[in-house]
Amino acid sequence: MTEAEIMKDYQNAMNEEYEAQQKNTEDVLTSLSKKVDANYLQAVKDWLGDEDNGIWGNLKIVYNTIGDWQDEVNEYEESYWDILKGMYVNQSCGYSGDDYNGTLEVKISETEYLRASFSL
């Protein structure tokens, strides 16, 4: 296999992963729109879209958290924290010591949470 073929295969795989994550996000947000009000849904969308959170996808609605609670109220300027109030964080440190990955979870209801994968 030539280098050009390898790069093309890699690009195709990356595109397929991106499309799968986009579909997952659309499906989960559609489901979420039936569970929360419009303001909460917009706050979730803003949280997902904030590049500082490093969220890349793998969204799912779960019934138990796996992270530790972080109260984000008044910590940052992002107005979505006024609605979401905080998140559960489950993270690991990478090899270099200054990179992190794991999951973030925000509350949907008393028994449901939205989990997203992140890396920074």
Image (cartoon, rainbow, N blue to C red):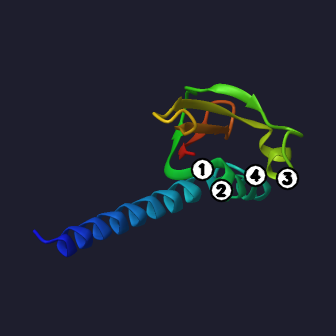
Label located before the other in sequence (3 or 1):
1
CB contact under 8 Å: marks 4 and 2: no
Depth check, front residue: 29 or 80:
80
Q: Which percent across, then down, holds residue 96?
A: 50, 36
Q: Which residue is mark 1?
A: 54
Query: Which residue in the rendered view is the most extreme toward the right?
Result: 74
User: Which quadrant holds residue 86?
Assistant: top right
- Separation of marks 3 and 4 at Cα, in angstroms: 11 Å
- Answer whether residue 113 is visible to the viewer in this image: no
Q: Secondary structure at mark 1?
A: loop
Q: CA distance from mark 1 to mark 4?
A: 20 Å
| Disc 3 residue type (three-letter) | Ser
User: Mark 1 and mark 2: span between their CA atoms?
Assistant: 5 Å
Residue 101: percent from left, percent from top: 52, 38
User: Identity of the amino acid at label 4?
Assistant: Tyr
Which residue is at 44% across, 59% downward? 21
- Checking the image for residue 40, the label placed there is 4
Within 10 angstroms of label 1, few (less than 14), some, or many (20 or more) residues?
some
Contact, mark 2 vs mark 3 (Cβ under 8 Å) = no
Q: Which tag is nearer the camera, tag 2 or tag 3?
A: 2
In the image, 31: left or right of 20? right
Query: Which dot, 4 or 2, sits closer to the camera?
Result: 2
Which numbered disc, 4 or 2, marks the residue that appears first in the sequence? 4
Marks 1 and 4, the one that precedes in the sequence: 4
| Residue designated by label 3 | 79
From the viewer's perspective, is the residue at label 1 or at label 4 nearer?
1
Q: Check disc 2 and give the amino acid type.
A: Glu
Q: CA distance from mark 3 to mark 1?
A: 17 Å
Residues at marks 4 and 2, CA–CA distance in whole angstroms: 19 Å
Q: Which mark is residue 51?
A: 2
Query: Closer to the observer: label 3 or label 1?
Result: 1
Q: Residues within 10 Å of mark 4 (few under 14, many from 20)?
A: some
